Amino acid sequence: LRPSVEIVVAVRDEEATLPGLLASLARQTDRTCRFLLVDDRSSDGTPRLLETFRAAMPDRVRVLSSTAEPAGLTGKQAALDLAIGAAGGDVLAFTDADCVVPDRWAEQLAARFADPSVGVVLGRVRLPEDRAFLRRFQAFEQPLINQYNFAPLGLGGAFGCFGNNLAVRREAAVAVGGFRGLGWSVTEDTTLLTAIRDLGRWKVRAAVSAAGTVTTTAKPDWASYVNQHTRWNAGAIHARDW
């Protein structure tokens, strides 16, 4: 029996990019997958977009609101923790508002979890190429980072991932206490991955086909790029693997 998939997205002030993601979610070929969207204290038109999406598929979409200032967690961690507690799907598929997912994304992820020993699936991420040097550079760099995440899996290790293409067995997420149980981290996705890995109960696998590849948005300037990579490396330095 193929496990059920619930797609989870935490959003905050994302009205500019959210329509593209929501349109791609509506195109999912897996018509049984459900959507759990969490608004993290948005002050723009994000709540209206989420509600419109919910109204179009009321039997498949739920919208939650994370209204309180989180204590001991980042805002995104608190929003995702709320989702884990409310989710009902066998598999939780995480992505972000600045992404577009392929039509067969949920279907591809569910297939990997047909093996009950699999607890986490890492997906591939791509950036569209562009003539501008910075965006072209990021499109070139991304496959290298993907390989850094995927290569250790063949050696029995799991050290990094991207939260915009990450699927976790809900039972495993609950077993580590959700994000509340993991505590504060600037790289919440990798913290979740390594905590599940350390339980020793589930395998980590990769979904590398084009049908399971998420397209994300390049950083528009060098300052944003440096801030992003500083956050990624800060998370790596403070990880237990270090």
Image (spheres, rainbow, N blue to C red):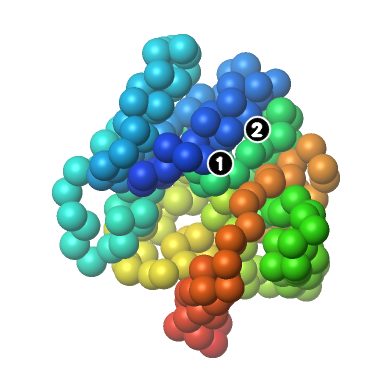
Q: What distance separates the C-alpha of mark 1 from that of mark 2?
A: 8 Å
> In the picture provided, is 39 more to the left or to the right than 151?
left
How crowded is the residue under tag 1: few (<14 C-alpha within 10 Å), some, or many (20+)? many
How far across and how far down the image is residue 8, in percent? 47, 39
Amino acid under disc 1: Ala
Q: Residue at x 47, y 13 (%)?
A: 57
Which sits in the foreground, 10 or 82? Answer: 10
191 relative to 35, above or below: below
Image quarter (top left, top right, bottom left or bottom right) of the N terminus: top right
Residue contact at pointers 1 and 2, CB within 8 angstroms: yes
Residue at disc 1, secondary structure: strand
Sooner in the amino-acid sequence: mark 1 or mark 2: 1
How far across and how far down the image is residue 188, in percent? 44, 63
Does the image show residue 150? no
Determine the residue located farthest toward the right in the rendered image: 209
124 relative to 63, above or below: below
Identify residue for label 2. 106
Residue 93, label in figure: 1
